[in-house]
Amino acid sequence: MRRSPRFGSDVIVDLLQAFGIEYVALNPGATYRGLHDSLVNYGQGKPEIILCTHEKVAVNVAHGYAKVTGRPMGAIVHDVVGLLHGTMGIYYAHLDRVPVMVVGATGPMDRRRRRPAIDWIHTAQVQGEAVRNFTKWDDQPFTVADFPASFARAYRIATTEPAGPVYLCYDAGLQEDELAAPVAIDDVVAAARPSPVQADPAALVAAADLIARAQRPVIVTEFTGRHPQSFAQLSGLAEELAAAVIDLGGRVNMANRHPLNLTGGDVLKDADLVLALDVGDLHRALNELDRDSRERAKRSRLAPGTPIVDIGLSELRQSKWAEDLGDFQPVALSIVADTRLALPPLRALVRERLGTRDRGPRRKQLGAMHQGVRERWAREAREDWDASPMTAGRLASEIWSVIKDEDWVLTSNTLEDWALRLWDVDSPKRHPGRSFGTGTQIGVSLGVGLAYRGSDTLVVDVQPDGDLLYDPGALWTAANSRIPLLVVMYNNRAYYNDWEHQIRVARHRGTPEDNARVGQEIDDPAPDFAGLARSFGWYAEGPIVDPAQAGVAIQRAMQHVREKRMPALVDTIVRRRQPKRFR
């Protein structure tokens, strides 16, 4: 039975519990001291507090948790400064289409109740404006009686496709005020939530007509695998059509060893129709950039006149501020729909039109192309096999040799995509989607680990060195919250993504390529990541330069994670790849 709330912040805890929020990640802040007391005492530890050393990490943890579960968790941020610290995490949650409940505080708005100076500089006029351009909704209720409806609307908006972060700001004074009367929440909790967006039936018929006429259709997909049922539907459609599939990796959308998965091939050039499913930036997917030319020319990957059918929700999440939709891509037919609802009827319509047409020869042809791509990757992974420092392909192979018989999940970084090429990625569970910018991956990985805490699933984080240096305190959170995470460092002792850009600029300008390293190396001194991890209570080994030593060290670390249910880190040094020269 729910206890009777006494204070405004107790009502917030009632709402968090009633809407199934299991965890709240936070860094302490005075503006929500009322809420903190309610979480610990009135809520009796539910939701569980995940203590973080930075607000961005708190948001990243909620981001990773939502990628796995599809459900939001809370990220609590302190007034103006905490919100500003968390903005990068919120922005990346927006880009990744995940629901996050960002809860903040301000004031007191009653100026008579503010402490001198500190409450003034930490209070903004409409605090939500700081994140309004990359949240789906924000609100600052002015009475405790408004808390239930405000929270319910925020939850509905965050979880309605396309999902995204929302921000709720609670007056510090209202949190601490005693309630003059009971505040009911049952009606808003029981209120029906919006159903998914279904496609226009006539548009699906038109799409089926176009698709069924194609001889060499290609499916391009990015976020379809966010729903397990859509993963199966996409594979079924591809098999019925004998269509090649290109997986852009927003989620795992098709098993990487499926014979129709042509990711990494050049099948688009021969396509006579493209079916785009849940693609965020369609122009990027269908065009290629000559990174080494001075003009940075863009060329279509398709033959002129190739029809494109686009199904998804991108048009519902456009921002007036960030141009993350990319360049405009003309299409023959655009259908706004949730693909988990659109794919089954589309498949039925296509089957009717295909009739008894034999697609066996095309499936065989694509299977041979798939095998050719896999054989190329296997050869490339063996290149410089004994090099020290090791190649990314060697490290991916060593990790796979250790985890392949486990029930595993890869969190964020894919090790220059070698994990997706060499491992058996057979379901959406195996990888909740590609990584984003530097300074997000360790926090997101913790959120993925939190979602699987208490299970037998082995959570693996291939962790870039530059990313970890943004948020080293996240290692403490993992140990403190008992998140069993196997971290293998992808350590090239550099911010190498930008180093590559500097090499290209040097080649264009005729300046010394060796100077590209200046301001890019993470060396002299080289960070001791194993020592850092041990200082936070982790098991750790490294640095390991000899590739022959990597596998046994990863095996020992995995055993620690399994036996102790605590995190472990292996610091492996990886050679820096060289960008190809332009012609």
Image (spheres, grey):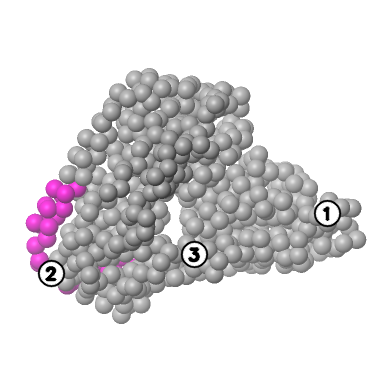
Q: Is residue 44 left or right of residue 327?
A: right
Relative image position of residue 326 (x, y in whole percent): 43, 64
| Circle 3 SS class | loop
Residue at the image point whose x is 24% and y is 44% from the top: 257
Relative image position of residue 366 (x, y in whole percent): 16, 53
Observer-side mark, 3 or 2, equals 3
How many numbered callouts? Answer: 3
Relative image position of residue 354 (x, y in whole percent): 15, 69
As measured in the structure, the alpha-carbon distance from the residue carrying label 3 to the one carrying label 2 is: 43 Å
Label 2 Cα crowd, 10 Å radius (few <14 / some 14-19 / many 20+) = few
Q: Amino acid at mark 3?
A: Glu
As measured in the structure, the alpha-carbon distance from the residue carrying label 1 to the one carrying label 3 is: 35 Å
Q: Earlier in the sequence, mark 1 or mark 3?
A: 1
Report if residue 536 lies within the magenta region.
no
Res. 572 in view: yes
Q: Earlier in the sequence, mark 3 or mark 2?
A: 3
Label 3 Cα crowd, 10 Å radius (few <14 / some 14-19 / many 20+) = few
Q: Place residue 552 in its image quadrant.
A: top left
The residue nearer to you, when weighing 572 against 578, is 578
Residue at the image point whose x is 87% and y is 62% from the top: 111
Relative image position of residue 498 (x, y in whole percent): 46, 44
Res. 395 in view: no
As measured in the structure, the alpha-carbon distance from the residue carrying label 1 to the one carrying label 2 is: 71 Å
Q: Is residue 105 left or right of residue 163?
A: right
Per the image, the residue denoted by label 1 is: 119
The residue nearer to you, when weighing 120 against 255, is 120
Per the image, the residue denoted by label 2 is: 355
Report if residue 366 lies within the magenta region.
yes
Q: Amino acid at mark 1?
A: Asp
Per the image, the residue denoted by label 3 is: 323
Q: Amino acid at mark 2?
A: Gly
| Circle 1 SS class | helix
